[in-house]
Image: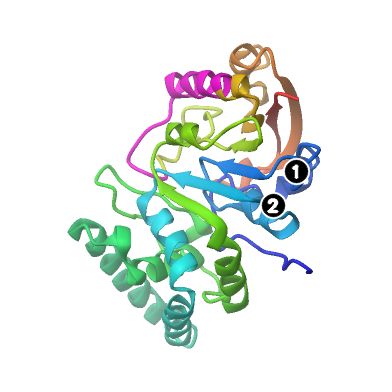
Amino acid sequence: MTKKALKPIVKWAGGKGQLIGEISSLYPKGLGTSIKRYAEPFVGGGAVLFDILSKYDMDEVYISDINAELINMYCKVKTEASELVSLLSTLQEQFIPLSDSERKIYYYERRSRYNGLILSGKSEDSLESAALFIFLNRTCFNGLYRVNSKGLYNVPMGAYKNPQICDADNIMAASEALQNVEIVCGDYKESEKFIDKNTFVYFDPPYRPLNATSNFTSYTENDFGDKEQVELSEFAGRMRKKGAQIVLSNSDPKNTNSEDEFFDKIYSSYIIRRVEATRMINCNSASRGRIKELLISNY
């Protein structure tokens, strides 16, 4: 049976769409045959997840993220895709014909509604929240997902002329592919019980900022600093001892400080590759351009 090519449902800061060629070249030999389990504990936009689901027959797949609204979106794509498409179609039909000033009113009304669902505690199991999550992602500035200290979404409206809010075909195909996927809202460490010697694991944590101004706050109200990066390297080491095949991504500190050996030290027993990527999300257009990122593997 020919598999359908799947795309990420949402844009994501640090999304791996542009690096999928380099990452897929590191997929372990035997993926889909001797290696039939896949774990992605920082799923984000899921570019690698959907690439693997498009190409391989996996027995078991595990994804997780601490962003509860993101995970709710994936759950609703899995379980209520038709209803989600219906809501998104309505949002698209209402939004697209509006003038710029009308779009602005519409956007901020929907953003306020979305934040109201978060404040009420209803956003973590809500079809409406999932639809608004996708709508805001598709119409906001640069496809950012950013929240304040209260966990409320605070990204302004973008300037897209004709955004695709409802990609019905991709959502329905993704729903079919996600039927065999365990979707968890939680810390990456919860994946330990899933990971074994027959598992390929891809870790794509929040990147270590290259400078003090590059950390745009976060995808959630939680921070991921150097201490957490070291803890992740230690966790990866434990998964390595289990026999798992591991690939990790992160920023390359040497872009701004050639003497910064942070990742070279904590992953000294791994293979570290430096690959070119484009920094897409930066409010200063002069700061967007080609930089090096790290792809780290234990094989």
Instruction: Inspect the magenta stretch and tell me whether residue 225 lies in it.
Output: yes
> x and y percent of residue 266 in the render?
59, 14
Q: Amino acid at mark 1?
A: Leu
- Horizontal side, residue 139 vs residue 292: left or right: left
Height in image: 270 above or below 157?
above
- Horizontal side, residue 119 vs residue 106: left or right: left
Q: Residue drawn 54% across and 63% down?
A: 179
The label shown at residue 31 is 1
Height in image: 112 above or below 94?
above
Is residue 155 visible in this depiction of the protein? Answer: no
For marks 1 and 2 on the same chain, the one whose residue lies earlier in the sequence: 1
Q: Residue drawn 77% across and 45% down?
A: 33
- Quadrant where the N terminus sits is bottom right
Q: Quadrant of residue 256?
A: top right
- Horizontal side, residue 157 vs residue 266: left or right: left
Q: Residue drawn 62% across and 36% down?
A: 201
The label shown at residue 51 is none
Height in image: 283 above or below 103?
above
What residue range appears in magenta?
219-238
Image color mode: rainbow
Residue on which disc 2 sits: 52
Contact (Cβ within 8 Å) of mark 1 with mark 2: yes
